[in-house]
Image (cartoon, grey):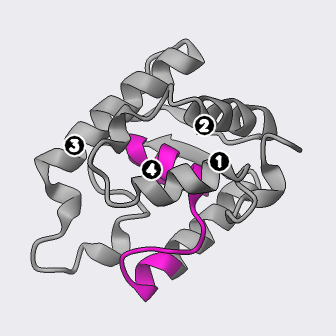
Amino acid sequence: MTVRLRPHHLLCILTYAGKGYSPAFTANLTVIAGRLAAGEEIEIVAGPDDVCAPLLADPEPHCHRCSVTERDRAAATDVGRLLGKPIASGDGLVLDDTRLRLLRAAFSAGQIRSACRDCEWADLCTSLAEDGYADTVLAGRSPQG
């Protein structure tokens, strides 16, 4: 199987620590993080993805807002620059240890954080990154080893 992720969720998964918008959202993202930790491939998508699924039944899910689309654009630009190739809908990648270390090092250094501007989770993510990602779901795969 493949995990469908919009570009800014590539960043969110780096610091995911079991917190989220609702219990259903959190349970879903925990499962997704486990799938990624097991080496499942990511397919980049435009618009709502597997992470968004529990929110789509809401009357006005934020997943469709222009601000979220802008986060995706910024994340795709930053991550593409880091990886040396454009990140676009339909692209596949695996979050292996090497790629996870690279993304987390760049995230910690602020190099791929333009999508995080004005995000309600930014302070939590910064704190988790400063602590070496120890309390994240993917903690065993941190830059430190």
Give the residue number, with chain letter if any, for mark 2.
Answer: 108
Q: Spot the residue most to the top.
A: 84
- The x and y percentages for residue 73 are 29, 32
Q: Is 84 in front, or is 19?
A: 19
Residue 101 image position (x, y, % from top left): 74, 36
- Rounded to the nearest angstrom, the CA distance separating label 2 from label 1 is 7 Å
Q: Which residues are magenta?
A: 1-26
Q: Nearer the viewer, mark 2 or mark 4?
A: 2
Res. 88 in view? no
**Label 2, residues with CA under 10 Å away: few <14, some 14-19, many ≥20:** some
Which element is circle 4 on? helix
Q: Residue at x 43, y 85 (%)?
A: 24
How far apart marks 1 and 4 lie (CA) works out to 19 Å
Give the amino acid type for the residue marked by disc 4 in the picture. Answer: His
For the residue marked with disc 1, what is the amino acid? Glu
Nearer to us of marks 3 and 2 is: 2
Image location of residue 15, percent across then percent down = 58, 55
Q: Secondary structure at mark 2?
A: helix
> Rounded to the nearest whole Å, what is the CA distance between mark 2 and mark 4?
16 Å
- Answer yes or no: do the residues labelled 2 and 1 have beta carbons within 8 Å? yes
Q: Which mark is residue 130?
A: 1
Closest to the observer: 98 or 90?
Answer: 98
Q: Which residue is mark 4?
A: 9
- Disc 3 from disc 4: Cα separation: 11 Å
